[in-house]
C-alpha cells in the first residue's frame, strides 16, 4: 500500500519540494494539477527521475504565463505589480489582508475572476475591526 510519505519520496527529491508545490497552488486544485504536471515533465526532460524545487518554480512561472498572464490588461498588471512589490518585495510575505472596503473594488474583482488573487480566509477579524 502506498502512503503519503512513500508517494512523496518517490516523486519529489525532498518533502520541501512538495510543500513548495502546495504553496504555489494556493488551495486551487486545478492549479496544483497543472503545476505538478508541468514540473513532472520538466524534471523528465532534464533527465531527473524526481521533481526538484527548480522544476516546481519553473512550472509555476510557466503556468502563470500560459494560464493567467495572458488575461491581464495594463491596469491589472499595474495593480498586481504594486501588490507583488509591497507584499513579497518589502514585507517578504506570501499573503496579505485586504480591507473590506476594497474587496468589491472593480480591479480586485477582476484579479479574483482570473484567479491571480485567491480568497484564503474569510471572516477574519483583527483587533482594529472587531
Image (spheres, rainbow, N blue to C red):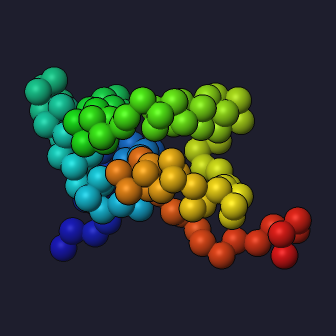
Q: Which residue shows up at 65% across the image and 56% down it? A: 102
Task: Out of 12 and 67, give the one closest to the viewer.
Answer: 67
Question: Compared to 116, does 46 lie above or below?
Answer: above
Horizontal placement of 82 versus 24: left or right? right
Task: Out of 22 and 118, give the one closest to the viewer.
Answer: 118
* Residue 112 quadrant: bottom left
Percent x, y for residue 71?
30, 40
Percent x, y for residue 89?
64, 28
Percent x, y for residue 11?
23, 48
Task: Out of 122 and 20, give the one closest to the viewer.
Answer: 122
Which quadrant of the rendered structure holds the N terminus? bottom left
Residue 78 visible within the image: yes
Task: Out of 118 and 10, give the one closest to the viewer.
Answer: 118
Q: Which residue shows up at 36% across the image and 60% down it? A: 28
Q: Which residue shows up at 60% across the image and 32% down it? A: 82
Residue 92 visible within the image: no
* Residue 129 quadrant: bottom right
Horizontal placement of 118 versus 37: left or right? right
Q: Residue furthest front?
A: 106
- Count how many numbered circles sit on residues in the image: 0
Percent x, y for residue 122?
60, 72
Horizontal placement of 86 versus 4: left or right? right
Q: Residue furthest right?
A: 128
Which quadrant of the rendered structure holds the C terminus? bottom right
Q: Residue furthest top?
A: 46
Q: Which residue shows up at 69% across the image and 64% down it? A: 100
Question: Compared to 130, does 22 lie above or below?
Answer: above
Amino acid at each position: 500500500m502506498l502512503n503519503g510519505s512513500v508517494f512523496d519520496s518517490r516523486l519529489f527529491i525532498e518533502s520541501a519540494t512538495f510543500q513548495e508545490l502546495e504553496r504555489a497552488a494556493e488551495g486551487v486544485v486545478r492549479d496544483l494539477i497543472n503545476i505538478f504536471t508541468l514540473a513532472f515533465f520538466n524534471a523528465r526532460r532534464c533527465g531527473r527521475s524526481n521533481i526538484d524545487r527548480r522544476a516546481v518554480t519553473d512550472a509555476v512561472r510557466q503556468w502563470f504565463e500560459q494560464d493567467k498572464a495572458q488575461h491581464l490588461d495594463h491596469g491589472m498588471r499595474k495593480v498586481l505589480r504594486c501588490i507583488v512589490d509591497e507584499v513579497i518585495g518589502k514585507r517578504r510575505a506570501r499573503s496579505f489582508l485586504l480591507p473590506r472596503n476594497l474587496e468589491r473594488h472593480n480591479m480586485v474583482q477582476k484579479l479574483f475572476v482570473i484567479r491571480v488573487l485567491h480568497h484564503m480566509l474569510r471572516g477574519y477579524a483583527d483587533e482594529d475591526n472587531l
